[in-house]
C-alpha cells in the first residue's frame, strides 16, 4: 500500500537537520560509552592504561623518528605501520584532538614515504629538470615522473632493418 506525504520545504529541512543532530549525538554517546568502559570497567581500565603508555612513550619515539629519519635518506621506511598507528589514534574511543592531529601528520608523512618508495623502485630522483620538488606538490610530481619513466621504458627504439632470413645477401666481388 503506497502513501503520499506532503511536507513544506522548511519542515523537510528541519527534519533533516534534526536527523543529522541525532546522528552526531549518537556518535558522541557511543564514544563516551567506549571511553567509560576503557577507563573504568573494561579489564580494570587496562585498555586506557595501554593507550596512556602508548601516548607517553611510543608517540615521542615515533615523532623523533619522523623528524630525524627523512624518507629521502632512509630507505624502507615502515610507512604501513605508521598508517596503522595513525588509524589507531584516529579511531581510539578516547582520542583527543592532539591525537587526531598527530594521526593526520603521520598519514601525511607516510604518503611522502610511499611516493619516495615508488620513485626509488622506478629509479626516479627527487629533481624535476634539476629543480627540487617542494612539499605540497611532491606526490603528484613523483607520480608524474614515474609515469614518464614508464613511458620511456615502453618506448623502444626500432631495430635497424637487417633483412629477413629468406633474403640472400648480395655479393660484391
Image (spheres, rainbow, N blue to C red):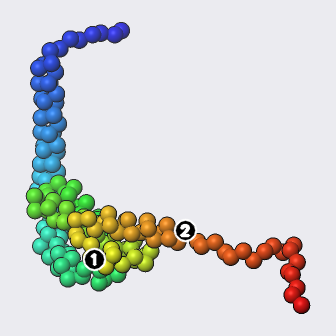
The quarter of the picture where the C terminus appears is bottom right
Residue beneath disc 2: 154
How many badges with numbers are in the image?
2
User: For this view, does 168 lie left or right of residue 36?
Assistant: right
Residue at the spot 30% in from the left edge and 83% down from the top edge: 74
Which of pointers 1 and 2 indicates the residue nearer the eye? 1
Mark found first going from the N terminus, 1 or 2: 1
Query: x%, y% of residue 113?
Result: 31, 72
Q: Is residue 42 visible?
A: no
Closer to us: 106 or 22: 106
Residue 27 appears in which quarter of the rendering?
top left
Residue at the spot 43% in from the left edge and 65% down from the top edge: 147
Query: x%, y% of residue 126?
Result: 32, 77
Query: x%, y% of residue 101?
Result: 14, 61
Task: Give SS at disc 2.
Answer: helix
Residue at the spot 26% in from the left edge and 65% down from the top edge: 137
Query: x%, y% of residue 91?
Result: 21, 55
Residue most extreme to the front: 173
Q: Which mark is residue 131?
A: 1
Task: Give SS at disc 1.
Answer: strand
Residue 43 appears in which quarter of the rendering?
bottom left
As displayed, is residue 93 above or below residue 111? above
Residue at the spot 17% in from the left edge and 75% down from the top edge: 63
User: For this view, does 120 lie left or right of residue 4?
Assistant: right
Closer to us: 136 or 107: 136
| Alpha-carbon span between mark 1 and mark 2 | 25 Å
The quarter of the picture where the N terminus appears is top left
As displayed, is residue 51 above or below residue 32? below
As displayed, is residue 11 above or below residue 34? above
Amino acid at each position: 500500500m503506497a502513501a503520499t506525504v506532503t511536507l513544506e520545504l522548511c519542515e523537510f529541512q528541519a527534519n533533516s537537520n534534526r536527523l543529522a543532530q541525532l546522528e552526531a549525538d549518537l556518535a558522541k554517546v557511543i564514544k563516551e560509552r567506549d571511553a567509560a568502559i576503557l577507563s573504568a570497567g573494561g579489564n580494570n581500565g587496562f585498555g586506557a592504561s595501554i593507550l596512556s603508555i602508548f601516548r607517553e612513550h611510543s608517540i615521542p619515539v615515533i615523532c623523533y623518528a619522523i623528524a630525524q629519519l627523512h624518507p629521502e635518506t632512509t630507505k624502507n621506511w615502515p610507512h604501513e605501520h605508521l598508517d596503522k598507528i595513525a588509524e589507531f589514534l584516529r579511531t581510539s574511543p578516547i582520542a583527543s584532538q592532539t591525537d587526531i592531529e598527530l594521526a593526520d601528520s603521520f598519514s601525511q608523512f607516510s604518503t611522502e614515504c610511499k611516493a619516495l618508495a615508488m620513485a626509488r623502485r622506478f629509479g626516479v630522483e627527487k629533481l624535476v629538470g634539476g629543480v627540487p620538488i617542494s612539499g605540497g606538490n611532491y606526490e603528484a610530481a613523483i607520480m608524474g615522473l614515474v609515469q614518464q619513466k614508464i613511458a620511456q621504458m615502453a618506448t623502444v627504439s626500432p631495430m635497424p632493418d637487417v633483412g629477413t632470413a629468406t633474403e640472400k645477401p648480395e655479393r660484391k666481388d
